């Protein structure tokens, strides 16, 4: 029995009148809505679909998607884009990605494309055209992207699983509960940062607070003004050590005035010592990195420019990847940044990242990262050591 209210059209979708793909998607959305007590479905303007890497979904995932893609679709008329896959979809051969893995990976992405999800392949779709408006209901699933779209843009999403975001993309709707409702978007922890922050400090802060707040909503008071790259780094870390989907930042994020901070009793003070200790603890080894892997979440053009400025005219000792979307790379190519980085011995890698790529099978042992999320996940998802530091300290020259 279905508990939530469905319109006549939605009932028809559940009954299979629009085909099997739509029916199966409605099954997922209605089950989710009933579990979480949603009153109804709500229209969305955007979806971001994770569950893409062959490393995480395997052959079973590929078969499921190819089967689903055989059915008819309705025109859900939303902007839907894919998360990073496990390979650079075009340049996997040149970059040394395993062949069988890369072929399967391309098949997965093709199946998603048949289901109407664009091959944007990034966890920072807000940099490349999948940009909802403030207040929009959306269904996003990559956890750093969820934190960004809720907090920095002020669109509304729960932390969806890949299948739920795909179902939402197919139908153009999501169940109305959780962070879609304003009363769940209030802060429940105040974070008073007593020192200025820069670079990898933001990841360290996110790592500490994610652990402290779990799935709650932190409200930050900072001494200095972060840029959007800092906010994406912070959100990624919050969403990986905890399950944060939304944060507020005084005078920075769009909903900070409605966060009800006066009613929040829990307050944490963060000192320079806390940040430095956490930065140290995020490294699992003192060894030098054999691969420096930047772009978690996927790099912006400014971050690629920063790397180009650091390596210009020099020869990098370690291997260097800077991971980003194909759209950002296209602009980096045009600006000459890619050429500078390649001449120094590094690569701008498209689509994939250090967590979802099979780097453990590619001969690397120690990965240098400037992202606390990557520092948290590379040891657990790839079984490799990490060194955590700022970009300029990670890159060594001949
Ligand atoms: C680790 C992560 O960023 C990438 C793995 O994603 P996927 O489920 O393989 O698309 C997922 C997440 O944090 O939501
Ligand atoms: S692990 Fe990092 S780079 Fe990879 S998809 Fe997640 S946020 Fe993006």
Image (cartoon, grey):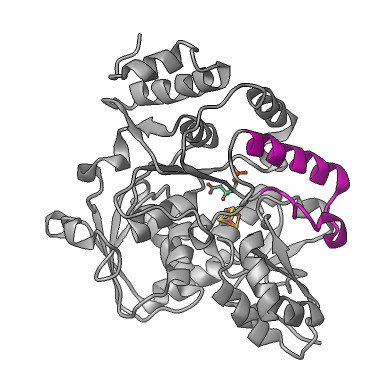
Query: Any magenta on residue 327?
Result: no
Say whether residue 294 is visible: no
- Left or right of 325? Residue 9 is left
Q: Position of residue 201 (x, y in %)?
A: 46, 74
Q: Main secondary structure of the magenta part?
A: helix
| Range drawn in magenta | 85-114
* Residue at the (62%, 83%) spot, across then down: 392
Residue 183 vs residue 166, the one in the foreground: 166
Say whether residue 328 is visible: yes
Query: Among all residues in the image, which is located at the extreme left?
Result: 262
- Left or right of 34? Residue 207 is right
* Residue at the (34%, 13%) spot, across then down: 2
Q: Quadrant of ligand 2?
A: bottom right
- Left or right of 230? Residue 153 is left
Residue 83 vs residue 114, the one in the foreground: 114
* Residue at the (45%, 79%) spot, across then down: 198
On screen, residue 155 above or below 4: below
Residue 106 vs residue 317, the one in the foreground: 106
Query: Any magenta on residue 91?
Result: yes
Q: Position of residue 152 (x, y in %)?
A: 36, 61
Q: Position of residue 187 (x, y in %)?
A: 24, 54
């Amino acid at each position: 029995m279905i508990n939530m209210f469905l319109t006549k059209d939605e009932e028809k979708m559940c009954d299979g009148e629009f085909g099997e793909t739509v029916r199966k998607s409605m099954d997922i959305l209605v089950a989710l809505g009933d579990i979480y007590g949603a009153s109804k479905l709500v229209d969305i303007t955007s979806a971001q679909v994770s569950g893409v890497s062959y490393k995480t979904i395997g052959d079973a995932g590929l078969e499921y998607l190819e089967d689903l893609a055989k059915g008819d679709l309705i025109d859900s008329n939303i902007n839907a884009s894919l998360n990073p896959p496990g390979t650079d979809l075009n340049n996997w051969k040149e970059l040394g990605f395993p062949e069988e893995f890369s072929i399967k990976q391309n098949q997965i992405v093709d199946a998603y494309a048949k289901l109407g999800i664009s091959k944007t392949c990034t966890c920072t779709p807000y940099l490349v055209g999948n940009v909802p408006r403030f207040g929009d209901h959306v269904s996003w699933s990559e956890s750093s992207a969820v934190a960004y779209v809720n907090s920095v843009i002020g669109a509304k999403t729960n932390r969806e699983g890949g299948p739920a975001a795909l179902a939402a993309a197919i139908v153009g709707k999501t169940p109305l509960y959780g962070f879609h409702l304003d009363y769940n978007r209030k802060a429940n922890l105040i974070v008073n940062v007593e020192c200025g922050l820069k670079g990898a400090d933001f990841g360290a802060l996110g790592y500490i607070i994610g652990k402290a707040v779990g799935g709650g909503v932190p409200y930050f008071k900072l001494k200095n003004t972060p840029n959007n790259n800092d906010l994406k780094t912070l959100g990624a870390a919050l969403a990986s050590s905890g399950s944060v989907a939304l944060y507020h930042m005084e005078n920075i994020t769009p909903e900070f005035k409605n966060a009800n901070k006066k009613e929040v009793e829990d307050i944490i003070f963060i000192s320079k010592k806390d940040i430095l200790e956490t930065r140290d603890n995020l490294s699992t080894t003192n060894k030098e990195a054999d691969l420096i892997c930047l772009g978690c979440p996927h790099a912006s053009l400014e971050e690629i420019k920063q790397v180009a400025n650091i390596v210009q005219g020099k020869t990098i000792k370690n291997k260097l990847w800077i991971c980003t979307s194909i759209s950002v790379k296209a602009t980096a190519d045009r600006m000459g940044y890619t050429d500078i980085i390649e001449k120094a011995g590094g690569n701008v890698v498209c689509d994939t990242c250090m967590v979802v790529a099979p780097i453990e099978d590619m001969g690397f042992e120690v990965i240098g990262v400037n992202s606390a999320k990557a520092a948290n996940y590379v040891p657990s998802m790839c079984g490799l050591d990490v060194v955590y530091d700022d970009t300029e300290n990670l890159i060594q020259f001949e």
